[in-house]
Protein backbone atom coordinates (compact mmCIF):
# COMPACT_ATOMS: atom_id res chain seq x y z
CA UNK A 1 0.00 0.00 0.00
CA UNK A 2 3.02 2.30 -0.23
CA UNK A 3 1.80 3.95 -3.43
CA UNK A 4 -1.88 4.40 -2.69
CA UNK A 5 -1.59 8.21 -2.68
CA UNK A 6 -0.91 8.08 -6.43
CA UNK A 7 -4.64 7.38 -6.89
CA UNK A 8 -5.65 10.78 -5.49
CA UNK A 9 -5.05 14.40 -6.35
CA UNK A 10 -3.55 16.78 -3.79
CA UNK A 11 -6.86 18.44 -2.87
CA UNK A 12 -8.56 15.10 -2.19
CA UNK A 13 -5.63 13.95 -0.03
CA UNK A 14 -5.91 17.08 2.11
CA UNK A 15 -9.63 16.44 2.58
CA UNK A 16 -9.02 12.78 3.38
CA UNK A 17 -6.50 13.65 6.07
CA UNK A 18 -9.29 15.46 7.94
CA UNK A 19 -11.45 12.31 7.89
CA UNK A 20 -8.96 9.79 9.27
CA UNK A 21 -10.08 10.31 12.87
CA UNK A 22 -13.77 9.79 12.03
CA UNK A 23 -13.52 6.07 11.23
CA UNK A 24 -15.92 3.57 12.82
CA UNK A 25 -17.71 0.23 12.19
CA UNK A 26 -14.47 -1.45 11.11
CA UNK A 27 -14.36 -5.03 9.84
CA UNK A 28 -11.85 -7.09 7.90
CA UNK A 29 -12.00 -10.70 6.71
CA UNK A 30 -8.51 -10.96 5.26
CA UNK A 31 -9.59 -9.66 1.85
CA UNK A 32 -12.26 -6.95 2.20
CA UNK A 33 -11.82 -4.07 4.64
CA UNK A 34 -15.02 -2.16 5.47
CA UNK A 35 -15.46 1.02 7.46
CA UNK A 36 -17.86 3.90 7.93
CA UNK A 37 -16.67 7.47 7.84
CA UNK A 38 -18.49 10.53 9.13
CA UNK A 39 -18.29 13.84 7.29
CA UNK A 40 -21.47 15.86 6.79
CA UNK A 41 -23.16 12.51 6.18
CA UNK A 42 -22.06 8.98 6.90
CA UNK A 43 -20.51 7.00 4.05
CA UNK A 44 -19.40 3.39 3.73
CA UNK A 45 -15.97 2.66 2.33
CA UNK A 46 -14.84 -0.73 1.10
CA UNK A 47 -11.25 -1.64 0.26
CA UNK A 48 -10.18 -4.85 -1.41
CA UNK A 49 -6.69 -5.61 -0.16
CA UNK A 50 -4.57 -8.61 0.68
CA UNK A 51 -0.97 -9.00 1.80
CA UNK A 52 -0.75 -5.22 2.08
CA UNK A 53 -1.65 -4.78 -1.61
CA UNK A 54 -4.61 -2.56 -2.52
CA UNK A 55 -6.61 -4.07 -5.39
CA UNK A 56 -9.76 -1.97 -5.44
CA UNK A 57 -11.79 0.56 -3.45
CA UNK A 58 -15.29 1.97 -3.42
CA UNK A 59 -17.41 4.44 -1.44
CA UNK A 60 -21.14 5.03 -1.07
CA UNK A 61 -20.73 8.76 -1.77
CA UNK A 62 -21.61 10.31 -5.13
CA UNK A 63 -18.05 10.55 -6.42
CA UNK A 64 -17.27 7.74 -8.84
CA UNK A 65 -13.69 7.05 -7.76
CA UNK A 66 -10.79 8.17 -5.57
CA UNK A 67 -12.84 10.20 -3.09
CA UNK A 68 -11.71 11.88 0.13
CA UNK A 69 -13.54 9.27 2.23
CA UNK A 70 -11.46 6.47 0.71
CA UNK A 71 -8.33 8.55 1.28
CA UNK A 72 -9.36 9.06 4.91
CA UNK A 73 -9.65 5.31 5.50
CA UNK A 74 -6.30 4.72 3.81
CA UNK A 75 -4.66 7.39 5.96
CA UNK A 76 -6.14 5.62 8.97
CA UNK A 77 -4.70 2.25 7.90
CA UNK A 78 -1.35 3.90 7.18
CA UNK A 79 -1.25 5.11 10.78
CA UNK A 80 -2.58 1.85 12.29
CA UNK A 81 -1.38 -0.98 9.97
CA UNK A 82 -1.59 -3.57 12.74
CA UNK A 83 -5.39 -3.43 12.53
CA UNK A 84 -5.31 -5.57 9.40
CA UNK A 85 -3.55 -8.31 11.36
CA UNK A 86 -5.96 -8.27 14.30
CA UNK A 87 -9.38 -8.10 12.64
CA UNK A 88 -11.05 -11.36 11.63
CA UNK A 89 -14.35 -12.36 10.09
CA UNK A 90 -17.35 -10.31 11.31
CA UNK A 91 -19.19 -13.44 12.39
CA UNK A 92 -16.60 -14.07 15.11
CA UNK A 93 -17.14 -10.57 16.49
CA UNK A 94 -20.89 -11.13 16.49
CA UNK A 95 -20.48 -14.31 18.55
CA UNK A 96 -18.53 -12.60 21.33
CA UNK A 97 -20.63 -9.43 21.22
CA UNK A 98 -23.46 -11.13 23.09
CA UNK A 99 -21.31 -12.33 25.99
CA UNK A 100 -22.03 -10.53 29.27
CA UNK A 101 -18.70 -9.76 30.98
CA UNK A 102 -20.09 -7.66 33.83
CA UNK A 103 -19.57 -10.47 36.36
CA UNK A 104 -15.96 -10.99 35.22
CA UNK A 105 -15.17 -7.30 35.50
CA UNK A 106 -16.25 -7.29 39.15
CA UNK A 107 -13.61 -9.84 40.17
CA UNK A 108 -10.72 -9.08 37.83
CA UNK A 109 -7.73 -7.46 39.52
CA UNK A 110 -6.51 -4.01 38.50
CA UNK A 111 -2.99 -5.31 37.79
CA UNK A 112 -4.25 -8.04 35.45
CA UNK A 113 -6.49 -5.56 33.65
CA UNK A 114 -3.57 -3.16 33.11
CA UNK A 115 -1.38 -6.00 31.84
CA UNK A 116 -4.09 -7.11 29.44
CA UNK A 117 -4.67 -3.58 28.12
CA UNK A 118 -0.95 -3.01 27.49
CA UNK A 119 -0.82 -6.23 25.50
CA UNK A 120 -3.95 -5.41 23.51
CA UNK A 121 -2.78 -1.85 22.80
CA UNK A 122 0.31 -3.25 21.10
CA UNK A 123 -1.81 -5.53 18.93
CA UNK A 124 -4.59 -3.06 18.23
CA UNK A 125 -3.59 0.61 17.87
CA UNK A 126 -7.21 1.52 17.15
CA UNK A 127 -8.17 0.26 20.61
CA UNK A 128 -5.39 2.36 22.14
CA UNK A 129 -6.46 5.35 20.07
CA UNK A 130 -10.10 5.04 21.19
CA UNK A 131 -9.07 4.49 24.81
CA UNK A 132 -6.92 7.62 24.90
CA UNK A 133 -9.49 9.64 22.99
CA UNK A 134 -12.21 8.60 25.42
CA UNK A 135 -10.31 9.34 28.62
CA UNK A 136 -8.47 12.43 27.48
CA UNK A 137 -11.77 14.29 27.67
CA UNK A 138 -13.16 12.60 30.75
CA UNK A 139 -11.93 12.29 34.29
CA UNK A 140 -9.92 9.20 35.18
CA UNK A 141 -10.83 9.66 38.83
CA UNK A 142 -13.27 7.19 40.38
CA UNK A 143 -15.37 9.64 42.40
CA UNK A 144 -17.37 6.80 43.96
CA UNK A 145 -14.20 5.36 45.48
CA UNK A 146 -13.52 8.62 47.33
CA UNK A 147 -17.12 8.81 48.51
CA UNK A 148 -17.02 5.23 49.76
CA UNK A 149 -13.77 5.89 51.64
CA UNK A 150 -15.29 8.90 53.38
CA UNK A 151 -18.41 6.93 54.36
CA UNK A 152 -16.19 4.11 55.65
CA UNK A 153 -14.33 6.54 57.89
CA UNK A 154 -17.64 7.75 59.32
CA UNK A 155 -18.93 4.23 59.77
CA UNK A 156 -15.78 3.00 61.52
CA UNK A 157 -15.78 6.00 63.84
CA UNK A 158 -19.26 5.20 65.07
CA UNK A 159 -22.03 7.33 66.57
CA UNK A 160 -23.22 8.24 70.02
CA UNK A 161 -26.64 9.79 70.69
CA UNK A 162 -27.00 10.42 66.97
CA UNK A 163 -23.66 12.25 66.58
CA UNK A 164 -20.43 10.95 65.10
CA UNK A 165 -17.56 10.22 67.46
CA UNK A 166 -15.15 12.69 65.92
CA UNK A 167 -12.30 11.80 68.28
CA UNK A 168 -12.43 8.18 66.96
CA UNK A 169 -11.81 9.27 63.38
CA UNK A 170 -9.38 12.13 63.89
CA UNK A 171 -6.40 10.48 62.17
CA UNK A 172 -8.16 8.79 59.21
CA UNK A 173 -10.28 11.89 58.54
CA UNK A 174 -7.26 14.18 58.75
CA UNK A 175 -5.33 11.89 56.37
CA UNK A 176 -8.29 11.77 54.00
CA UNK A 177 -8.26 15.55 53.73
CA UNK A 178 -4.47 15.94 53.64
CA UNK A 179 -3.79 13.12 51.19
CA UNK A 180 -6.87 12.14 49.20
CA UNK A 181 -8.41 15.56 48.73
CA UNK A 182 -4.96 17.03 48.19
CA UNK A 183 -4.43 14.44 45.41
CA UNK A 184 -7.69 15.53 43.78
CA UNK A 185 -6.56 19.14 43.87
CA UNK A 186 -3.17 18.26 42.37
CA UNK A 187 -5.00 16.50 39.53
CA UNK A 188 -7.26 19.53 39.11
CA UNK A 189 -10.39 17.61 40.11
CA UNK A 190 -11.60 20.79 41.77
CA UNK A 191 -15.33 20.09 41.76
CA UNK A 192 -15.00 16.70 43.42
CA UNK A 193 -12.60 18.15 46.02
CA UNK A 194 -15.08 20.98 46.65
CA UNK A 195 -17.96 18.55 47.11
CA UNK A 196 -16.09 16.25 49.50
CA UNK A 197 -14.80 19.13 51.60
CA UNK A 198 -18.32 20.42 52.02
CA UNK A 199 -19.68 16.94 52.73
CA UNK A 200 -17.22 16.79 55.64
CA UNK A 201 -17.91 20.27 56.92
CA UNK A 202 -21.69 19.90 56.59
CA UNK A 203 -21.51 17.05 59.11
CA UNK A 204 -19.05 18.58 61.54
CA UNK A 205 -20.11 22.24 61.45
CA UNK A 206 -22.45 21.50 64.36
CA UNK A 207 -21.50 23.20 67.61
CA UNK A 208 -21.39 19.88 69.46
CA UNK A 209 -18.05 19.12 67.78
CA UNK A 210 -16.33 22.41 68.56
CA UNK A 211 -14.83 21.22 71.85
CA UNK A 212 -13.00 18.39 70.11
CA UNK A 213 -9.41 19.13 69.08
CA UNK A 214 -9.97 17.11 65.89
CA UNK A 215 -12.49 19.71 64.73
CA UNK A 216 -9.75 22.34 64.51
CA UNK A 217 -7.71 20.09 62.23
CA UNK A 218 -10.72 19.75 59.91
CA UNK A 219 -11.46 23.46 60.02
CA UNK A 220 -7.84 24.38 59.25
CA UNK A 221 -7.53 22.17 56.15
CA UNK A 222 -11.04 23.03 54.98
CA UNK A 223 -10.19 26.71 55.03
CA UNK A 224 -6.83 26.24 53.29
CA UNK A 225 -8.14 24.04 50.49
CA UNK A 226 -11.35 25.97 49.90
CA UNK A 227 -9.40 29.20 49.42
CA UNK A 228 -7.15 27.43 46.92
CA UNK A 229 -10.12 25.99 45.02
CA UNK A 230 -11.80 29.36 44.69
CA UNK A 231 -8.56 30.91 43.44
CA UNK A 232 -8.00 28.23 40.78
CA UNK A 233 -11.39 26.70 39.95
CA UNK A 234 -14.62 28.03 38.52
CA UNK A 235 -17.53 28.15 40.96
CA UNK A 236 -20.89 29.85 40.90
CA UNK A 237 -21.88 32.67 43.21
CA UNK A 238 -24.31 30.31 44.95
CA UNK A 239 -21.48 27.84 45.65
CA UNK A 240 -19.27 30.61 46.98
CA UNK A 241 -22.07 31.94 49.21
CA UNK A 242 -22.61 28.44 50.56
CA UNK A 243 -18.94 28.20 51.56
CA UNK A 244 -18.89 31.70 53.00
CA UNK A 245 -21.47 30.58 55.55
CA UNK A 246 -19.15 27.81 56.74
CA UNK A 247 -16.15 30.12 56.68
CA UNK A 248 -17.98 32.66 58.80
CA UNK A 249 -18.59 30.02 61.48
CA UNK A 250 -15.00 28.72 61.30
CA UNK A 251 -13.42 32.14 61.48
CA UNK A 252 -15.66 33.11 64.36
CA UNK A 253 -14.36 30.18 66.39
CA UNK A 254 -10.76 29.81 65.28
CA UNK A 255 -9.80 33.47 65.11
Image (cartoon, helix red, strand yellow):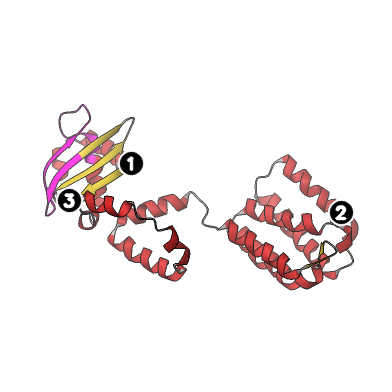
Q: Residues within 10 Å of mark 1 (few under 14, many from 20)?
A: some
> How far across and how far down the image is residue 128, in percent?
35, 56
- Magenta stretch: includes residue 58: yes
Give the farthest residue toward the left.
55
> How far across and how far down the image is residue 111, in percent?
44, 70
169 or 70, nearer to the observer: 169
Secondary structure type for disc 3: loop
Secondary structure type for disc 2: helix
Picture residue at 31% right of the left edge, 39% below the top = 18
Give the residue number, with chain letter if any, for mark 1: 22
Quarter occupied by residue 87:
bottom left
The magenta span reads: 46-71
Picture residue at 71% right of the left edge, 66% below the top = 155
Please, is residue 2 above or below residue 215 in the view? above
Give the residue number, with chain letter if any, for mark 2: 249
Please, is residue 45 above or below residue 85 in the view? above
- Magenta stretch: includes residue 217: no
Picture residue at 17% right of the left edge, 35% below the top = 66
Precedes in sequence: disc 1 or disc 3: 1
Residue mark closest to the camera, 1 vs 3: 3
Quarter occupied by residue 113:
bottom left
> How far across and how far down the image is residue 136, in percent?
46, 52
Q: Is residue 18 left or right of residue 194?
A: left
Q: Are marks 2 and 3 in contact (CB under 8 Å)?
A: no
Q: Residues within 10 Å of mark 2 (few under 14, many from 20)?
A: some
Q: CA distance from mark 2 to mark 3?
A: 69 Å
Give the residue number, with chain letter if any, for mark 3: 29
Give the farthest residue toward the top.
62
Q: Residues within 10 Å of mark 3 (few under 14, many from 20)?
A: some
Q: Is residue 76 left or right of residue 102?
A: left
> How far across and how far down the image is residue 246, in percent?
81, 52
Amino acid sequence: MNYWKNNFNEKTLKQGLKYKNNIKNISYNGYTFKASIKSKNEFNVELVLQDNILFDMSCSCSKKSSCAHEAGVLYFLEEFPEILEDFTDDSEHEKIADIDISADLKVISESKLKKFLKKEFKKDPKLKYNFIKQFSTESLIDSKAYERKFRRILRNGGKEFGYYKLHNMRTPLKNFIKKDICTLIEQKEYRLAYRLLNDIMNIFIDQIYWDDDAWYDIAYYYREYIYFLFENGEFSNAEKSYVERNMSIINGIVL
